[in-house]
């Protein structure tokens, strides 16, 4: 198990700070000997099976997308969106004014 | 060359790009690199793993430059985290794209690959590097329906010990293979870069060596 790689994979996700590694350390973490297929295998449970999900135009549609994933892959763990966390942010698109803030 | 990719929700890509460029500018890094916003990815409403691409061509001080870029990226992400944020589904979809295109992951948004400067005739990573690797593991000739994550893993396992010769490497080797006596210690051919399937995103620039043993050529693995 490559702990440096594990730290990288969760870096910056919910409740996890960005890892403080130099580029040298990051590169070293990727060349410690774990074959790529083993890394790939470890990642497989976390890869979203519905890779080509289209981004909903309306954040309310996130629930709909969630349901599609649940229906297709009952074992997939979903993060439940907290509607109270939704806050306005500036965007390049005028049609989208609200995003769910996850991190 | 090192290529860095930032995967983003296309609706937030412009905001994230602006924040990142400001950070890179404030640290004086911009003159030494190229930073691109991928408009094609913004056109689509699907999550993209190459919304922003950073090219680092400098061979000297590469490490130092990459550390500075990393610091700027972290600062940009901290200061405007909503632009870099992903839903869990988007993050998992990005992860799938990262591993499928043999990239080294730094965090949920940032990945990188290393390329020999003229690798794959300077095509993009997806057009050149991924194609080389897929060719090496026999994935490129298979029907799309068979190119699943599991079949890709099986193919990688079977081909683990292979090295992926770039087109430039093969071209440089041709005259040597025709005339083996022309290979000498310390020549350019020994310094030719190549890619190993065990670390597909990384290029070993200097430490692998092609040597002649008993009239045959053999690639010695890196000492590192």
Image (cartoon, rainbow, N blue to C red):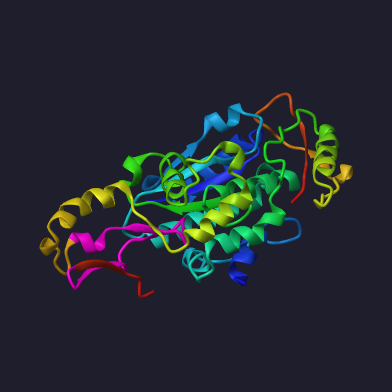
> Measuring 59% from the left and 63% from the top, which residue is drawn there?
A38
Q: Position of residue A84 (x, y in %)?
A: 88, 44
Query: Any magenta on residue B214?
Result: yes
Looking at the image, residue B108 sits to the left or right of residue A35; the answer is right
Looking at the image, residue A42 sits to the left or right of residue B22; the answer is right
Query: Any magenta on residue B53?
Result: no
Q: Position of residue B202 (x, y in %)?
A: 43, 58
> Measuring 82% from the left and 49% from the top, which residue is drawn there?
A78
Q: Quadrant of residue A67?
A: top right
Looking at the image, residue B52 sits to the left or right of residue B221; the answer is right
Q: Position of residue A94 (x, y in %)?
A: 70, 24
Vertical position of residue B41 compared to residue B183: above or below = above
Whether residue B127 is visible, yes or no, is yes
Q: Position of residue B156 (x, y in %)?
A: 52, 57
> Measuring 62% from the left and 72% from the top, which residue is drawn there?
A1
Looking at the image, residue B152 sits to the left or right of residue B216; the answer is right
Between B57 and A46, the one lying in front of the other is A46
Whether residue A11 is visible, yes or no, is no
- Write down the region rendered in magenta: B188-215
Q: How many numbered discs?
A: 0
């Amino acid at each position: 198990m490559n702990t440096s790689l594990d730290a990288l994979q969760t870096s910056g996700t919910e409740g996890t700070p960005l890892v403080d590694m130099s580029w040298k350390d990051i590169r070293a973490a990727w060349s410690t000997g774990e074959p790529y297929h083993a890394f790939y295998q470890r990642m497989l449970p976390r890869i979203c099976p519905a890779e080509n999900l289209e981004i909903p135009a309306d954040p309310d549609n996130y629930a709909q997308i969630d349901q599609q994933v649940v229906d297709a892959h009952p074992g997939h763990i979903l993060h439940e969106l907290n509607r109270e966390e939704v806050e306005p942010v500036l965007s390049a698109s005028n049609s989208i004014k609200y995003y769910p803030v996850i991190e | 060359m090192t290529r860095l990719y930032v995967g983003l929700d296309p609706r937030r890509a412009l905001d994230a790009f602006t924040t990142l460029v400001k950070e890179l500018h404030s640290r004086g890094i911009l003159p030494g690199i190229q930073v691109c916003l991928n408009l094609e990815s913004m056109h689509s409403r699907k999550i993209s793993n190459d919304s922003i691409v950073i090219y680092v061509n400098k061979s000297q001080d590469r490490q130092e430059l990459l550390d500075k870029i990393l610091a700027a990226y972290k600062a940009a992400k901290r200061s405007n985290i909503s632009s870099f944020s992903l839903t869990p589904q988007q993050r998992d979809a990005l992860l799938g794209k990262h591993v499928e295109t043999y990239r080294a992951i730094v965090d949920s948004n940032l990945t990188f690959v290393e390329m020999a400067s003229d690798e794959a005739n300077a095509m993009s990573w997806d057009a050149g590097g991924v194609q080389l690797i897929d060719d090496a593991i026999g994935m490129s000739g298979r029907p799309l329906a068979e190119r699943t994550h599991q079949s890709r893993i099986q193919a990688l396992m079977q081909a683990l010990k292979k090295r992926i010769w770039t087109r430039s490497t093969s071209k440089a080797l041709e005259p040597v293979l025709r005339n083996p006596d022309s290979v000498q210690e310390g020549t350019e051919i020994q310094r030719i870069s190549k890619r190993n399937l065990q670390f597909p995103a990384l290029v070993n620039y200097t430490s692998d060596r092609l040597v002649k043993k008993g009239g045959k050529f053999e690639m010695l693995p890196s000492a590192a």
